[in-house]
Each structure stands twice: as structure tokens, then as C-alpha cells.
Image: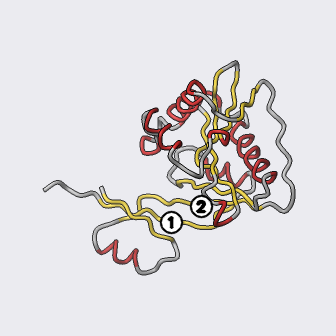
Amino acid sequence: MLRVGVIRQDRLLPQVLAARGFAVATSIQRMRISFDGPVAAPVVPAGVVVRQGAPDEVTRRAVHGVLMEAFAEQPDALPRPYDEWAASRESRSTFDWSQVTIVEIDGQAVGVTECNDNFVSTDNCGYVGRLAVIPSARGRGLAKFLLRTAFATDSAAGRDGTILHVDTGNPTPAVALYTGVGMRPDLISDIWQRTMQPA
């Protein structure tokens, strides 16, 4: 399968791709919230314990487990096996384990954000690389809490805003979640796809 991302404003490449049998499979929105002033940290929901950072393997495995469970219904979004996933984080100059936030209920990790500095040099914005809440813990406001925690952290660090990407084909109501906390799309890319038959 071949996939090509095309910025929505491009008028020529979509015609070329369509002529070669490609079709739009989904769209990726880059969403952003800009800060007008300091952003207060949100109130921690009742019964929730918040842990900042993943300094050891036990915690990192808990984070990976949340990602695996949360994205189980989205096979294309599943993280790599633990060792590969952890190594990929270690290899990034814009990532640090201190940028992971975990929420727990009854001693179990149920939600996480993986943030990084991918957009600090270009946009002076923090970036939410992954946001995940396991299905059994959804509907309690944990995703909004994690996002608002990221906003407050970025604001305190002097960032102008926070950015993330979302697949509009996501089976969860992710786009509504992000717009509900004040994020807006500032760049949209269509993902064109073509299935190649083996010779």
C-alpha cells in the first residue's frame, strides 16, 4: 500500500495522484491552541493520582500498556513493541521522559500524554505526541484534564501555545475533544492511498 500526504492547499498534486489511481483515505489535522496569557493548571479530578515523568522501566511499561490498550481499536496507531518504542523515545533529541504525564485510578495507569519539543524551535509551541485514555476510564474528563495540564506546562515554560495532530478517521471523538478545549486546525493534510497488487 502506498500513502502520500498532501497539504490541503496544494492544487496540483491531488490531480496527479488521482490520475494514478490514488484516493483520499483520511485527513490529518494539525491543531493548535495559542495562549493569551498564563494558563492555570486544571483541578485534579476526584480519585485520580497524577504522576509526572517516567524515570524507570516499570513506569515506562505502564505507559506503553496504556497506549496499547487505548489504541487497540486503531491497529494503524498502535505503538511499536515495548523495546522498540522505548528506544525510539530515547533516540529523539526533542523528547525527555520527564515530559510524560500519567493519570492513575486505584493504582492503575489509565491515561497518559507523551509531550515533546518538536515544535519549540519553529513555533515556540509544546507538542502532544500521544494522548491516550483506556476505554474503561473514558467519560470522566481525563483526556481534557491531560490536555489542560499540557497547556499549563507549556504556558509556564514560556511557550506561545500547544500543537498536536489528529487523524479525522479516528473512531473516538478526538476532534470534538480538541475543539472543546479551544484547539483549532491550522494545517490540514489529506492522506492519499493506493493499494498495489503483487505482480
Q: Amino acid at mark 1?
A: Ser
Residue picked out by circle 2: 30
Percent x, y of residue 189: 50, 65
User: Image point 60% across, 47% down: which residue?
Assistant: 95
State which tag comes first along the sequence, 2 or 1: 2
User: Image point 70% across, 63% down: which residue?
Assistant: 124
Percent x, y of residue 106: 70, 18
Of residues 155 and 140, the one drawn nearer to the viewer in this rendering = 155
Residue picked out by circle 1: 189
196 w.r.t. 150: above or below: below
Residue 1 appears left or right of 41: left
Of residues 152 and 141, the one drawn nearer to the viewer in this rendering = 152
175 w.r.t. 187: above or below: above
Percent x, y of residue 97: 62, 39
Q: Quadrant of residue 130?
A: top right
Which secondary structure lies at badge 2? strand
- Is the Cβ of the residue at disc 2 closer than 8 Å to that at disc 1? yes
Q: How many marks?
A: 2
Q: Quadrant of residue 138?
A: top right
Q: Amino acid at mark 2?
A: Arg
User: Image point 62% across, 35% down: which residue?
Assistant: 133
Rounded to the nearest whole Å, what is the CA distance between mark 2 and mark 1?
A: 8 Å
- Label 2 neighbour load within 10 Å: few <14, some 14-19, many 20+: some
Q: Quadrant of residue 108?
A: top right
- Label 1 neighbour load within 10 Å: few <14, some 14-19, many 20+: some
